[in-house]
Image (cartoon, rainbow, N blue to C red):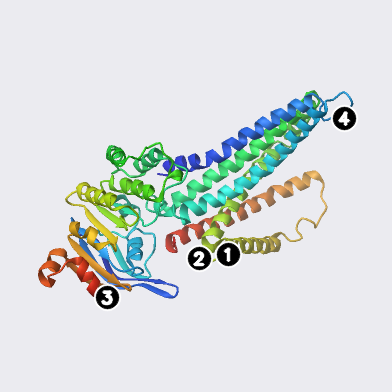
Amino acid sequence: MLGKLLKYEIKSTARVFLPIYGLIIALALLNKFFIANNTYVYSNSTNKAMQIAATVSMMTYVAFIVALFVVTLVVLIRRFYRNLLGDEGYLSFTLPVSIHSHIDSKLIVTFMWEALSLIVAGFSIFIMTINGNTMQSFSKFCMGISEVYEKYGPLAHQLTAEAIIFVILSMLACILQIYASIVIGNLSGKHKMLASFGVFIGFGIVQQIILSNVYGGRFGKNIMDGESFAYFMRTELISMIIFSLVFAAVFYFITDWMLRKKLNIE
Amino acid sequence: MDNIMECRNLVKYYPGCLALNSVSLAVPKGQIVGLLGPNGSGKTTLIKLMNGLLTPTSGEILINGMKPGVETKRIVSYLPERTYLNDWMDVKTMTDFFGDFYKDFRKDKAYEMLQRLGINPKDRLKTMSKGTKEKVQLILVMSREAELYVLDEPIGGVDPATRDYILNTIISNYSENATVIISTHLISDVEKILDGVIFINKGSIVLTSTVDDIRENEGKSVDALFREVFKC
């Protein structure tokens, strides 16, 4: 059943994201065209109209990148709220599907779009900036990285793996924090959105208090060189991974429990 | 198990409002039962509890001997009193959706009814009128071969001609072992198809009876009895 939920979850959100992705790539290509033709460099030879077109195209591109991340957040909230706690909840919760599957499907698909949005944004920058020079410095950068890997082998690999796991887990924890805030905020009779926002801030404060108690002053204590910092980070990252895992699990549990026990669709 | 739905001392308390006050009730299999009561009497609360959309404050509700959950949702076909259709879908996607999630959904049946009511499967739900959406919803719900149909105000928003069609659809689509619970206040319209009635008021059951008993013992129609019991 999770597979079927995923299918409709993706269907319902793809129609928002795919057009934006397409437009961003198209605008990046257009910008690339203007950059390659030196339209942005002011000189008498360049065409005024082209310059205006180039500026508009670049500004639209930036606006779309900003919009992409706003939309990602809005869709995350709206889809969860509408499909589970709004009128559509009458259908969602009468499907022969467990509450877990509902949360999982929304979590997975939201994570997927967040990751894709980052990739598309990165790729569009790559399109615009690619030329002989940037390729050279990019390959230099890659060589530098492979040197580091050669020198520090296992340590570097472990650090990379830990960093990736940490980023993924904190993204998931953040999505779940929003879900938990929405289900708790939904308990309030009026001003559900405002209440959810307040709960979200509250969760944030609690997390900050816990983390600052654990990590407070630990990073600043001794100035380290790069290598011992890397060793230090290797262990610190593990504890940070554990923290995001715990936060994610707590938020998941709250969301699941609230939907199971306190469900109250208007 | 002879009862498809059973509640024992069922209480549902909302902050500042006792929606159901210790309701004990049993609905046997194979009947069409009217859940009748004035507005705010607890009809919808009871129905939401049957579907697991609410959890009881205390007491118990059993569907086919089970607490509401994934298993009971497989056998209950529920029509809520509001439109729950996903705006972004067209009718065809919606039938696919039902087909994907409910094993007992009969697509051919749904398409036949859609055609009969002149609804184009390609139409987007967003552009439909409220009445048309309600028709689509009822078609989807009645195209399942469920054991229990729970219909909350199925005829409230449609014209009298469609009302007849809907009631016919309900009678002709439910099999011998299936049970239909219909909540409504349009009693005279549904009276002719009901086997039994449950009168509910202010969260308590006022009366449960078969329609034949009412006619024989009281010598009046359900509609007349309702007007008498709930006289303002």
The type of residue carrying mark 1 is Ala
Residue assigned mark 3: B231
Q: Nearer the viewer, mark 3 or mark 2?
A: 3
Q: Say which chain tag 2 marks.
A: A
Q: On the rendered structure, is A74 left or right of A104? A: right
User: In the figure, A174 relative to A147: above or below?
Assistant: below
* Residue at disc 4, secondary structure: loop
Q: Disc 1 or 2, which lies upstream in sequence?
A: 2
Q: Disc 1 or 4, which lies upstream in sequence?
A: 4
The type of residue carrying mark 3 is Lys
The type of residue carrying mark 2 is Leu
Residue visible at 18% across and 55% down in the picture: B30
In this rendered view, identify the residue nearer to me: A240 or B134: B134
Give the CA separation, mark 1 to mark 4.
52 Å
Give the CA separation, mark 1 to mark 2.
9 Å
Q: Say which chain tag 4 marks.
A: A
In this rendered view, identify the residue nearer to me: B231 or A23: B231
Determine if marks 3 and 2 fall on one subunit: no
Residue assigned mark 4: A42
User: In the figure, A189 relative to A135: above or below?
Assistant: below
Residue assigned mark 2: A187
Name the mark on residue A195: 1
CB contact under 8 Å: marks 3 and 2: no
Residue visible at 59% across and 52% down in the picture: A173
Determine if marks 4 and 2 fall on one subunit: yes
Q: Disc 4 or 2, which lies upstream in sequence?
A: 4
Quadrant where the N terminus of chain B is found in the figure: bottom left
Q: Nearer the viewer, mark 1 or mark 3?
A: 3
CB contact under 8 Å: marks 4 and 2: no
